[in-house]
Image (cartoon, helix red, strand yellow):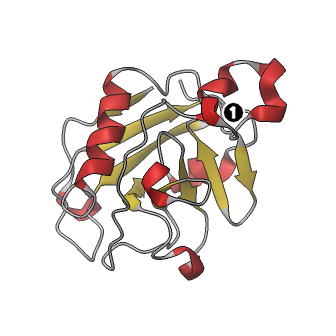
Amino acid sequence: VIAPALALAPQAATPQVKATGPVLVVQTVKGTFEIQTFPEEAPKTVAHILALVKRNFYRGLRFHRVEKNFVVQVGDPQTRDRTKEESWGKGPASGSGTPIGVAEFSKLHLHKRGAVGMAHAGDATKADSQFYVMLRNAPGLDGKYTVWGQVISGMDVVEKLAFGDVLK
């Protein structure tokens, strides 16, 4: 389950920017983590993610990409079906079917540990529902992928996630 949080403690904000967006509470089989969203810097991306959350799009999806000390990724609806494991994360059926249509890069939010960004297959405007959480700093990704949030609690949970773990 991914749900908007009811309140955000002031100390939970990222240091670079005042936290103004909703906080998403992400429940997984390994525990819960929270994502502070950045609608001022990535308004269309955050709106798209929130619309998918409200539709329960992410419920039951599996983490299909887990690279130790790099990234964990989720958001492919094909992951509900174990028989399609070879296709997870790939092809036209690997998203919601509605790309965001813009690349919202920000110099305020970079690819540091806990950053949440939009995955894509080479064209940032075609990012759709797949997102990732950084497990380490990766400045080489800055300006290539939209960072729309930051994990503000539960990073220990994110680090425990494994391939195939389910979003509740």
Q: Residue under circle 1? A: 165
Q: Is residue 49 above or below residue 42?
A: above
| Crowd band around label 1 with a 10 angstrom C-alpha radius: few (<14), some (14–19), many (20+) | some
Q: Is residue 57 above or below residue 17?
A: above
Place residue 88 in its image quadrant: top right
Mark 1: amino acid: Asp
Q: Is residue 29 visible?
A: no
Q: Is residue 167 visible?
A: yes
Q: Would residue 44 appear left or right of 89 to someone viewing this image?
A: left
Quarter placement of the N terminus: top left
> Residue 29: percent from the left, percent from the top?
62, 29
In terms of secondary structure, where does tag 1 sit? loop
> Residue 156: percent from the left, percent from the top?
57, 54
> Residue 131: percent from the left, percent from the top?
52, 48
Name which residue lies at 55% across and 74% down: 141
Q: Would residue 105 appear left or right of 64 to someone viewing this image?
A: left
User: Which is more toward the observer, 154 or 110?
Assistant: 110
